[in-house]
Amino acid sequence: MFLTHGDTDHIGEALPLIDGLKIEELIIPDGFVREEIEQKVIKAAERKKIEVRTVQAGDKISFQDFSFYVVAPITLTNSKNDDSLVLWTELGGLKWLFTGDAEMGSEERIISMFPSLRADVLKVGHHGSKGSSSEPFLDSIMPSIALVSAGYKNQYRHPHSEVVEKLSSRGITLLRTDLHGAILYNFKGKSGTFSIHPPYDKLKE
């Protein structure tokens, strides 16, 4: 189980998952433990004898058939969001970049440390907040598909219109959970297809 950082909307259900699922390894970024919520998660994992692995930029996490490469955090700041775990991998014939809530500071450090990094699919940082997805970052990563995780009619109005415009002006296809619902990628070997399942609340309108 990967935990990107300690905000409740990212790890709030970690304790039930640790108690209810068989988890062999918990992977967290350097600097993860900052408040009581993160301490509780680590203690719960230790009670269940789950291996806790702390990673940082440059580390490689290998499984049987594929690997994740850690591209952030590079240096720690005072921001949980900007110190999010950021992962790159290749699955189903596509290159994927999962950014957690990484902000523009982290994006700048990533493209500086990994200038040749590219991704077909970008999980947009911080739910599409205007504090992420800088133009230099998008131009360097060069995604063709962007995914935004945001609740339907969420109070923060994510994704921000500026981010949507940046993606649209670059011809990047945007899939967002608030409008499209569950976003699935069914893959086998070196190919796959996206599918969407609209949210129930939106279908009622």
Image: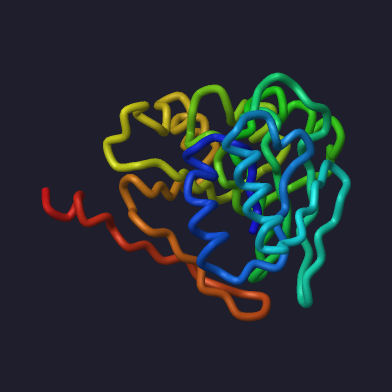
Look at the picture and state if 147 lies above or below 23. above
Camera-side residue of 118 and 147: 147
Look at the picture and state if 54 lies above or below 198. above
Residue 135 at least partly seen: no
x then y, percent, for residue 63: 78, 71
x then y, percent, for residue 10: 53, 43
x then y, percent, for residue 202: 20, 50
Residue sitting at the far top: 78
Q: Residue at the location (54% across, 62% down)?
A: 19
Residue 152 is left or right of residue 108, and the answer is left
Camera-side residue of 61 and 71: 61
Residue 117 at least partly seen: yes
Q: Residue at the location (87% across, 50% down)?
A: 59
Camera-side residue of 55 and 41: 41
Look at the picture and state if 108 lies above or below 171. above
Residue 43 is left or right of residue 164, and the answer is right
Q: Residue at the location (67% across, 36% down)?
A: 84
The total number of labels drawn is 0
x then y, percent, for residue 163: 48, 29
Q: Quadrant of the N terminus?
A: bottom right
Q: Residue at the location (64% across, 43% down)?
A: 4
